[in-house]
Amino acid sequence: MSPDELTLVRGASCTLDDIDAEILHTLAAIIERVDPGPAVLIDSIGLVLTIDALHTEVAELRQIGAPDLALRSEEPSIEAATITFTTDVLTVMITVQAEADRVRVDGWATPPASLGVELHQGGLVTRTQSDADGRFSFSDLGRGPARLVLRRPQDPGLPVVTPQIEL
């Protein structure tokens, strides 16, 4: 064992005293002030653990191409993006449209069915039900990271979860 390893072993076998605790608390405060963790970190970790615990079907993002209006211009443009997510059991296509400073999401799921659809955005969950053709929509949404959770009636305990996207 090297001298450095011996020092570590000796240090690890000692108990922390009040001075050690004060140093660790000061370091934690400095790190929190200089480089705080992302505000949504706890929510993201919770969702990932929930997904793992539920053994969910996680949808894969498919890029179809760049939108026609994805050009730089001095003129104001209409934002629209079509995004497709696929799994072995469900395909979901959504269109995201800007409505002033808010966003509207229109979606279609195949195979067509009435699905429970949730939009998770930060700590908020907005719920809707798709029609029998698999169509659903959300309006007046804030911009920011979001993901969809879809629940099929034949297997409600195994939701389909999309990757996080930016609205």
Image (tube, rainbow, N blue to C red):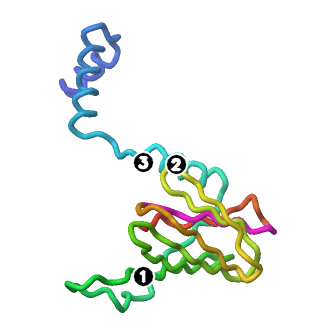
Q: Main secondary structure of the magenta part?
A: strand
Q: Quadrant of residue 51?
A: bottom right
Is 146 drawn above or below residue 81 in the view shown? above
Q: Give the residues in magenta.
A: 145-154
Amino acid at pointer 1: Ala
Residue at the front extreme, as displayed: 100
* Total labels drawn: 3
Q: Earlier in the sequence, mark 1 or mark 2?
A: 1
Q: Is residue 1 visible to the viewer in this orientation of the structure?
A: no
Amino acid at pointer 3: Val
Q: Earlier in the sequence, mark 3 or mark 1?
A: 3
Q: Residue at x 51, y 72 (%)?
A: 104
Disc 3 and disc 1: Cα gap in Å? Answer: 26 Å
Left or right: residue 26 compared with residue 50:
left
Disc 3 and disc 2: Cα gap in Å? Answer: 8 Å
Amino acid at pointer 2: Gly
Left or right: residue 2 compared with residue 140:
left
Which residue is denoted by mark 3 in the rendering? 40
Is 32 drawn above or below residue 62 in the view shown? above
Q: Quadrant of residue 88?
A: bottom right
Which residue is denoted by mark 2 in the rendering? 123
Disc 1 and disc 2: Cα gap in Å? Answer: 25 Å
Residue at the bottom extreme, as displayed: 68
